[in-house]
Each structure stands twice: as structure tokens, then as C-alpha cells.
Image (tube, coloured by chain):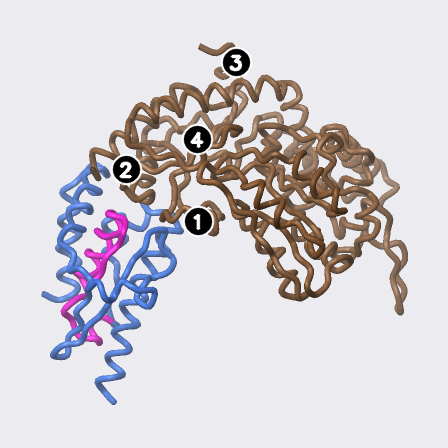
């Protein structure tokens, strides 16, 4: 599936819920299936700043595709990180760099999170794109 | 249960009448900022409707009237905190600016390389960073008084940390995370026995306890209007005249001068020396109205009611079984920081918010303190005299919901 298609799928999943509480329960479920980051990467080097909870993110590069793993000490945040991983992981650096993350607004994630939390969200997306840029540069050298 | 007329008082606060996410707003973030009664709101809009103009400068009627009102508020503040003179009352933007002013000015006049500034590990960033920065510039050091697990200051450690290099003690009256009321008179007496002046950060105390600077005998006391039902952007720095006279100005410009020549400038007398530029006159009008409002309610009545609310909240939360309180000092103001089992405060805060309840989660601008407890953050509910027992019940319901979702 393309990044766009995955985003559409996620928007469809969330639209099944009217109640914001149900959306959060779904997000919590989402967190449980996150591809967990290796313990050895749970260091300051891989922490995303700008989040109220701790978020770790790591990227591997295999066969031209970037594979993300992550974790968080807060459950809702873990769900959000996994959503981002679902969308961006297992895609090429170019696909990741050229994508618009508009599903965030469409499922109402940005409006339901205060600016502080949104900054965390923005930081995560920024970091994932930085990884893409780094691996793209590395692979063209 | 209580005879405090809370329902009637709530009518004075328009913002409390709204719903959030289709639920009645429960505002439990008063340590971050307090709501304003209509009397304060009207004082501000009234200022712009009839009184607005620049002050201290004009001979015209409007200017004289506004100047009188501004200076009358300075006198009111002087009486409110029992200062010796209105020359000792400086209007600032808030407690943060007040502390920056003292750190900078006192620092320039009294602090040199090798000197020490003594603060505590429970301080708000605004009573840490200004000292850190000033000490970096001047080659001095900041020392942190430790606390006991219950959130009380380690007084033995405090006494042992005071030495001949200590030039100032800067300490909070009440902790914004723990609610601890510090034993100021004892600390000030001890510091004074070594000739060390004391600044008290009264931001969290002023709305719950009030302040009597004569009784405390502190050398500086500061607070923010917005934490005592007055507008944002206005605060007070009290300083003993002998120190304020000796300290150089903080900001320069209009108002704080006596004479400006091309080659040199002389400065105005107190308090104007420390009030550069056009002041926040609307803020001062608002502060005036807030002080009168509090005086009418009576600080004693406020204190008693807030204690009842605090006791009720602690009882209810304790009965839930898995609440860990951060800050269990014997003497506390009406706020509680807590953890719900092993649930991350961020997760809890998101759900509690969705139930219409405004609490605060995070490090509360006190990272060294949160670090000391080795916890990620806390949930903080901070109460004011317009909160009710029913609202506490709502919070208990919300916490149960949190436990359901994340347990």
C-alpha cells in the first residue's frame, strides 16, 4: 500500500467512532502492536524532544526501505507513535520525504491535543523525515 | 457541609459557567493561573472606557486621575503586605520579572566570583534560572537545599549550607508542586544572623495565605497578579528600602530617570527607579479590584474553606487505594500532586481533560524537583475558593475512568 492509501485506511478506521473516548480506546489498542524499539536504543540519543512523555524512535535501512521502531512510557503516545510508524515504515526515503501527513488532522488528532502535545507529534514526524533524509543521502553517496 | 458561600461566589466568575466537551468545566489548575471575578474584569474594561492615558507625565485631568489611582493601588499593596513604605513596592510584570530584577541588580551590586546563592530543590524555574544565569556571569555558584521525601525542606542541611560565601537566600513561600509551606520565619532569622538577605517567592502563597513582610522580616517578596485573581502581566516586588536604594536600575528608559543628558543620565528615586517605560496601568486597576475582592471575602475564610476542600480531596483519593501523593508536608496549601498507580500522568491527564476537568500534568516548571523524586511527571490538581466538593467527586469519577482505560 502507498503512504496515501494507508492514511486513508486509518482515517476510515477512526471514522467508525463517534465518541472521542472510543477513539482513545482504539489508540490505546494501537499502541499494543507497536514494533518495539530494541532496548539497546532506549538511550538519550534516540529520544524525541518536545513530548510530555518519553518517546524513543529508531530507523533501520534495508533493501532501500526504512523500517521504524519506537516506544513510549505513556500509552496514548505509544498509540500515536505506532500510527506514524504504520504510515511511514517500510517505505523508501523519497516516499517519506514527499508525503503530507494530513491524516493527523483528518482523524482529529491535532485538534484534540494541546499545542504542547502537538509539538511532540510534529517533532516525531520531523525526526522520521530526518532519518529518511539521512538514509537517502547515505545511499546516494 | 461548609458555611462558605461558594455557590454565590461562583456567580462572580463568568468563565466558570461554561461547559467543555459537553461537561461543566471543573477548573483545578489554579496554581497555574486563577480566574477573575467580574469586579476585576470590569475594573480593566472600565479603565479603558473612562480613565486610560499615560500616567506620571501629564498635567491634564485624565492623567492626574489615572496617576492617583495607580499610586493609590501602590499604597493599597503596601498596606496589604504590611510593608513599611510605598517606596518599597515596585510594580513588575510578575514574579518571574521580579526575581530577574533582584538577581540582576542585587547580583551587580553584591555578588562576586566565588560567592554563593542558596535556593532549594523545590523551586520553580523562575527562582532557579535567573540565579543560575547571573552566577554564570559573575563566577558565583548556586546551591540547592535538599528536601525530605515528604516534601519538607531538610532544615539541618539548610543550616549546614549557609556559610561566609552565601550572599543571598532565595526561597519559595509555598511549593507549586508539593504545596509545602516553608518555615520562613525560622529560615529568615537564621540567614539574618549571618547578615544574609532573603528573597521570598510568594507566587503560590499570596492567594492562599497572604503575606506580611514586616512579620516575616524578609528582604524581598514577590508575587504575580494572575495567581491572585488579578490580571496577567502585573506583579509586585517588595524590597527593603536599604537594598533597593543600593541596587542599580534593572531596565532603563523613560520614567526611571531624573535627568537625561547626552553624556550622562541620573536616575529617579524609589520606586520609579525600577519602573521603566509605560506601566501596565490596566493591570494595576485589576490588581486593585482583586485585592478588594479578597479583603471582602476575608483571607481567614478563604484559608479555612480551602483547607476543607484539600482535606476532602485527600480523603477521597486516599480511599481509592492506589494514589501516591507527591508532597505530604504537615503544612500545605490546597493543591495535590499525585500518581495513579503506574499510569503515566500524561495518559491520565488526557482522559481527565476529556471529562471536562482541568488539571495539570508534567514537570510544572520544576524539573529538578521531579528529577529528585525519579518520576516522569505528576498530575496536579490545585484548588481555589470557588471550587466545590462536588467538583472533587467529579475528579474521583474521572480517575476511576482513567484506571478503567489503562489499568
Instruction: Tell which of B340 and B292 is nearer to you.
Output: B340
In the image, B381: left or right of B104? left
Residue B375: image location, x then y, percent: 36, 47
Q: Residues within 10 Å of mark 3 (few under 14, many from 20)?
A: some
The reply to whether residue B227 is visible in this rendering is no
Q: Which residue is mark 4?
A: B27
Magenta residues, as a range?
Answer: A70-96
In the image, A60: left or right of B97? left
Q: CA distance from mark 2 to mark 4?
A: 23 Å
Q: Which residue is mark 3?
A: B4
Residue B164: image location, x then y, percent: 71, 54
Tell which chain the image draws in blue: A
In the image, B220: left or right of B132? right
Q: Which residue is mark 1?
A: B372
Circles 4 and 3 on the same subunit: yes
Q: CA distance from mark 2 to mark 3?
A: 34 Å
Tell which chain the image draws in brown: B
Q: Which residue is mark 2?
A: B341
Image quadrant for the C terminus of chain A? bottom left
Q: Nearer the viewer, mark 2 or mark 1?
A: 1
Q: Secondary structure at mark 2?
A: loop
Answer with mark 4 or mark 1, whichever residue precedes in sequence: 4
Circles 2 and 1 on the same subunit: yes
The reply to whether dot 2 and dot 3 touch (C-beta < 8 Å) is no
Chain at tag 1? B
Q: Nearer the viewer, mark 4 or mark 1?
A: 1
Q: Residue at x 52, y 34 (%)?
A: B180
Instruction: Tell which of A102 and B154 is nearer to you.
Output: B154
Circles 2 and 4 on the same subunit: yes
Amino acid at each position: 500500500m502507498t503512504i496515501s492509501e494507508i492514511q486513508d485506511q486509518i482515517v476510515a478506521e477512526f471514522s467508525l467512532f463517534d465518541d472521542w473516548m472510543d477513539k482513545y480506546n482504539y489508540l490505546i489498542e494501537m499502541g499494543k502492536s507497536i514494533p518495539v524499539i530494541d532496548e539497546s536504543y532506549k538511550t538519550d540519543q534516540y529520544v524525541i524532544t518536545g513530548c510530555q512523555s518519553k518517546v524513543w524512535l529508531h530507523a533501520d535501512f534495508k533493501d532501500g526501505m526504512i523500517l521504524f521502531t519506537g516506544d513510549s512510557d505513556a500509552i496514548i503516545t505509544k498509540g500515536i507513535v505506532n500510527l506514524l510508524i504504520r504510515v511511514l515504515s517500510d517505505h523508501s526515503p523519497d516516499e517519506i520525504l514527499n508525503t503530507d501527513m494530513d491524516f493527523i488532522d483528518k482523524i482529529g488528532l491535532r485538534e484534540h491535543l494541546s499545542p504542547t502535545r502537538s509539538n511532540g507529534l510534529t517533532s516525531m514526524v520531523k525526526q522520521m523525515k530526518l532519518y529518511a533524509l539521512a538514509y537517502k543521502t547515505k545511499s546516494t553517496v | 457541609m461548609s458555611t462558605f458561600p461558594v455557590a454565590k461566589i461562583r456567580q462572580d466568575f463568568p468563565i466558570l459557567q461554561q461547559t467543555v466537551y459537553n461537561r461543566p468545566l471543573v477548573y483545578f489548575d489554579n496554581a497555574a493561573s486563577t480566574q477573575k471575578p467580574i469586579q476585576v474584569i470590569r475594573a480593566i474594561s472600565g479603565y479603558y472606557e473612562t480613565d486610560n492615558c499615560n500616567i506620571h507625565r501629564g498635567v491634564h485631568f485624565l492623567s492626574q486621575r489615572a496617576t492617583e489611582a495607580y499610586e493609590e493601588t501602590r499604597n493599597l499593596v503596601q498596606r496589604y503586605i504590611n510593608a513599611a513604605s510605598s517606596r518599597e513596592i515596585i510594580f513588575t510584570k510578575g514574579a518571574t520579572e521580579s526575581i530577574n530584577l533582584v538577581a540582576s541588580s542585587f547580583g551587580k551590586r553584591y555578588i562576586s566570583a566565588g560567592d554563593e546563592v542558596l535556593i532549594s530543590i523545590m523551586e520553580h524555574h523562575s527562582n532557579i534560572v535567573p540565579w543560575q544565569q547571573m552566577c554564570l556571569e559573575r563566577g558565583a555558584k548556586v546551591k540547592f537545599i535538599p528536601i525530605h521525601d515528604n516534601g519538607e525542606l531538610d532544615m539541618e542541611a539548610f543550616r549546614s549550607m549557609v556559610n561566609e560565601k552565601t550572599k543571598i537566600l532565595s526561597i519559595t513561600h509555598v511549593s507549586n508542586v508539593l504545596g509545602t509551606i516553608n518555615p520562613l520565619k525560622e529560615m529568615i532569622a537564621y540567614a539574618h544572623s549571618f547578615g544574609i538577605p532573603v528573597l521570598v517567592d510568594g507566587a503560590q502563597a499570596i492567594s492562599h495565605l497572604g503575606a506580611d513582610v514586616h512579620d516575616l522580616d524578609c528582604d524581598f517578596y514577590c508575587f504575580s497578579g494572575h495567581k491572585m485573581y488579578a490580571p496577567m502581566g502585573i506583579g509586585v516586588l517588595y524590597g527593603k528600602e536599604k537594598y533597593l536604594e543600593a541596587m542599580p536600575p534593572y531596565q532603563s528608559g523613560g520614567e526611571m530617570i531624573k535627568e537625561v543628558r547626552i553624556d550622562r543620565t541620573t536616575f529617579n528615586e524609589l520606586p520609579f527607579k525600577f519602573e521603566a517605560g509605560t506601566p501596565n496601568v490596566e493591570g494595576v486597576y485589576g490588581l486593585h479590584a482583586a485585592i478588594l475582592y479578597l479583603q471582602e471575602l476575608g483571607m481567614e475564610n478563604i484559608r479555612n474553606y480551602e483547607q476543607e476542600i484539600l482535606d476532602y480531596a485527600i480523603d477521597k483519593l486516599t480511599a481509592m487505594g492506589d494514589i501516591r501523593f507527591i508532597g505530604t508536608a504537615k503544612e500545605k496549601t490546597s493543591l495535590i500532586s499525585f500518581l495513579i498507580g503506574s499510569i503515566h500522568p500524561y495518559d491520565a491527564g488526557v482522559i481527565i481533560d476529556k471529562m471536562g476537568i482541568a488539571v495539570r500534568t508534567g514537570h510544572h516548571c520544576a524539573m529538578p524537583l521531579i528529577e529528585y523524586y525519579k518520576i516522569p511527571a505528576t498530575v496536579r490538581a490545585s484548588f481555589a475558593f470557588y471550587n466545590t466538593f462536588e467538583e472533587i467527586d467529579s475528579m474521583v469519577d474521572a480517575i476511576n475512568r482513567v484506571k478503567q482505560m489503562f489499568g
